[in-house]
Image (tube, grey):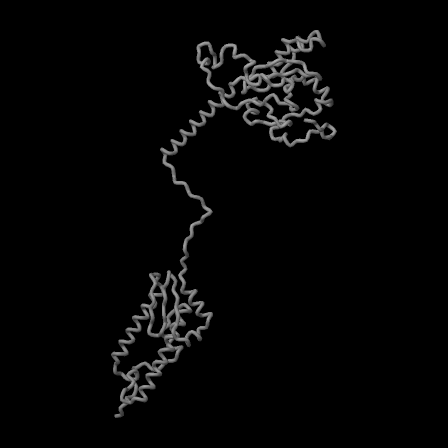
Amino acid sequence: MSDQQAPSRFAPQNQTTNERLSTNTVGLVALSDFRKRRAEVLEQQEREAREAALSRTNVSTPDRSLTATPNNASDSGDAERQKKKKKRSKALVSFGGDEDEEGDEGLVVTKKNGKVKTSAADKGAQEEGGEGASAGDTKDAEPSTKKIVANSSVGIVPRALTKAALRREAAEREALRKEFLLLQTAVKATEIAIPFVFYDGTNIPGGMVRVKKGDFIWVFLDKSRKVGAELGVGGEKSATARRDWARVGVDDLMLVRGSLIIPHHYEFYFFIMNKTVGPEGKPLFEYSAEAPLKDTASDSPSSVGGVLKGGPDINTLEGASDDPTITKVVDRRWYQRNKHIYPASVWQEFEPEKDYRSEIRRDPGGNAFFFSK
């Protein structure tokens, strides 16, 4: 019997690269895993070829891979390689700390900041895979998780309020509302004096009327009508002037403030609080929007509704020193007959949305007026 025994029929024969790949690869695998296993198969074939060459040169050391005698060292080496392969596969799915593991085939697995990168020590395996393949490996090995960044455009969400906090806020709003209503009532109840003239082409002195800031325009016109009946305005032109004033209604009269016709349904409070400006650049009704100071005399028993009986002297009221020619009380019938004649031709009805400060005053023909200041 010769020293070299015939190979056992039960021992595995040499296999090609594709056969070994088909044996080691089961099911669908990633392209990076397939290339790694192909590099391992190639390295194993080269190692076996080197061992076969050594066995042929050294006859005293038979190739135990071709015999039925088990090689404990080879078995232990295979077991060790299996352990390292398992560690390598675990490293591909692990997102732990920074570690480097190197296999016996020269394949290094790097885990850093949750990203997995692989690199082969064998330059031949890298050349076969190509640069595009290595880039694909790195891309495939990166985890799909992304860092969540806070959206700076979203404001801070207020925390939910408790029932007690909601009740406290509602009570504060109600208190502020009541305080405003009291202030508004006090301002509206304040009396003012409005000097005026009757106008029928010329200024006829009309005296002064006492009204409240919360009164409507028609209240002022009604009081001015009574003043006209008492003074007998127009008596030099008509013997029945007093009787005519008694028959005149509020709708037959107009209030012209400057060059604006003020509608009847507006309150003086509206112009005072909004500080409405007329064509001349001055407030239409320049009165204070603040509540008056509390008078100690108003708490006396002789006062009614917070105002002394008979009221304070009209000459001490706010607005008593104003120019009476700014406020004109005009008969509407006269205005309809003379609205094409100056100054009635430049009168216009008040519009709350209109800005009179930038307005250019024009006549009915569209010609601009030039006024000297």
Q: Note whether 120 is above or below 285 in the view shown.
A: below
Residue that sits furthest to the right in the current view: 365
| Picture layout, residue 115 above or below residue 312 | below
Q: Residue furthest top?
A: 239
Placement of the N terminus among the 4 image quadrants: bottom left
Query: In the image, is 106 to the left or to the right of 1?
Result: right
In this view, the residue in front, 273 or 8, is: 273
Residue plotted at (45% across, 27% down): 177
Q: Nearer the viewer, residue 72 or 367?
A: 367
Percent of width and height locating residue 363:
72, 27
Rendered residue at 25%/79% (across/down): 72
Q: Which residue occupies the foreground of this view, 250 or 193?
A: 193
In front: 211, or 92?
A: 211
Residue 248 image-quadrant placement: top right
Which residue does the image show at 41% across and 75% down from the upper left? 125
The furthest residue to the bottom: 1
Residue at image coords 64%, 11%: 228
* Residue 10 found in image quarter: bottom left
Position of residue 254 relative to residue 38, above or below, is above
Residue 172 image position (x, y, % from top left): 41, 29
Disc tally is 0
Answer left or right for 181 relative to 334: left
The spot of residue 42 in percent (x, y) is 38, 78
Quadrant including the C terminus? top right
Splitting the image into 4 quarters, where does residue 344 fall? top right
Q: Measured from the top left, where is residue 194 in percent x and y?
A: 59, 17
Q: Please indicate whether residue 223 sits to the left or right of residue 78 in the image.
A: right
